[in-house]
Amino acid sequence: MGSTASARNGTWRNWGGTVSVRPAREVAPASVDELAAAVRRAAEDGLPVKAVGTGHSFTSIAATDGLLIRPQLLTGIRDIDRAAGTVTVEAGTPLKRLNVALAREGLSLTNMGDIMEQTVSGAISTGTHGTGRDSASVAAQIRGLELVTADGSVLTCSEKENPDVFAAARIGLGALGIITAVTFAVEPVFLLTAREEPMPFDRVCAEFDQLHAENEHFEFYWFPHTGNTNTKRNNRSAGPERPVHPLRGWVDDELLSNGAFQVANWVGRAVPAGIPAIARISSRALSARTYTDIPYKVFTSPRRVRFVEMEYAVPREALVETLRELKAMVDRSPLRISFPVEVRTAPADDITLSTASGRDSAYVAVHMFKGTPYQGYFTAAERIFTAHEGRPHWGKIHTRDAEYFSRVYPRFGEFTALRDRLDPERRFRNDYLRRVLGA
């Protein structure tokens, strides 16, 4: 994912092209005090308030026709506490910039997602995650938060200070306040060895429990219309550092994974009947490789081909059955799917509305090339996911509502009660929050 959201003629659009809004006004505050003052002025004028990051959510979670806050001036590291193993960072900082700055200081997050274009606050507010046997989402690494609440006051929280807010606001959906700073747990930078290799779909399913148990970070991509997957295992290494050769990296990550894949999707969009043949070629395009590098260079990769996405977290023990049902649905349908299905895992955490809250989880993400009809595929996939009590990623396309979430999140009522207390007048409201949280 390269470029971010755009604004033309006063209209804000997200990266995937699924959302566009025209806010009444926009501000880019340069300090927490300026942000708080903007929230108070919006309250006086009766305007709802939302903050946007780089627009990588496919849902309208950040959309507003009121006051749109752009946090691009609230960036950089505030404080590094090496004794405590924490770093406090301004909420508008892009993850890419944070990762580079941490590496310069000899530090790293323990786990991260597979892209780093998002802002810190945007990533945590929607539940961005990577894959991990023992290490959880980006939000699970938070040790403290600072946010501006609906009345314009500044509230800080941690496990010891306002712990009820901390339990919820780490993945707060933008419903509890505007995050201004985040304190992360960090550790000395380490090395990961990545092993990438093709593997048959049936073998991955048969050996999934073993692959998950034996690797710190395991993920794979299944190519619809084929029986092929590409797998990736990331494990800590004593070194030495052996990064991908620059030429091999350009061929694999730019020429094949982005350039040729873009062309293949253009062809597939024009001639859908050719997609199965294209999928068979694409699934064999990348050969096995092994490399060792610092975390963000292993966990993340460039995504320049634009798409729309749905992702659900299902109980980890239900993953293989879910995948087999998804494959059977695709095989018997007239659907033509040009994008691979991404599968990752996360351990249970204690964040109120985390998709892994209280249960070990597996994530299944389905994608469609931007500009191609996705509704039929996503509707059929969502039917499978929800039959397994799946929880949709808050920033990715889904059709679920508050009634559904009250059933699949045991602590859903805790979150809505906290929202009633912190934002009784719904200053941070929008249509998306009305649907997923209720009035």
Image (cartoon, helix red, strand yellow):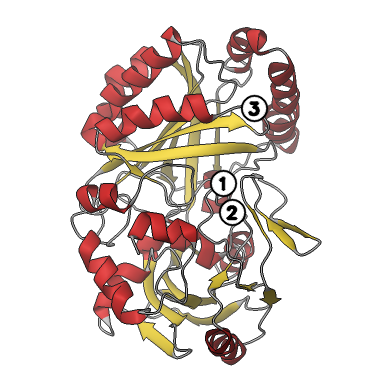
The answer to whether the residues at label 1 and label 2 have Cβ atoms under 8 Å apart is yes
Q: Where is residue 88 in the image (x, y as percent from the top left)?
A: 49, 78
| Mark identifier at residue 372 | 3
Mark with earlier residue (3, 2): 2
User: Residue placed farthest to the left in the image?
Assistant: 410
Instruction: Tell me the residue at 54%/42% (across/down).
Output: 292
Instruction: Judge whether 173 appears above or below 423 on screen.
Output: above
Classify mark 1: helix, strand or loop.
Answer: loop
Q: How much space separates mark 3 and mark 2, taking CA atoms?
A: 25 Å
Mark 1 — residue? Answer: 300
> Would you place residue 316 above or below residue 320 in this image?
below
Question: In terms of image quadrants, where is residue 270?
Answer: top right
Question: Which residue is rendered at x = 64% and y = 27% of the image?
Answer: 372
Give the residue pinned by disc 2.
Answer: 116
- Residue at point 38% right, 85% down? 156
Q: Can residue 240 be seen in this view?
A: no
> Relative to the observer, which residue lies in front, 323 or 419?
419
Q: Which amino acid does label 1 sit on?
A: Thr
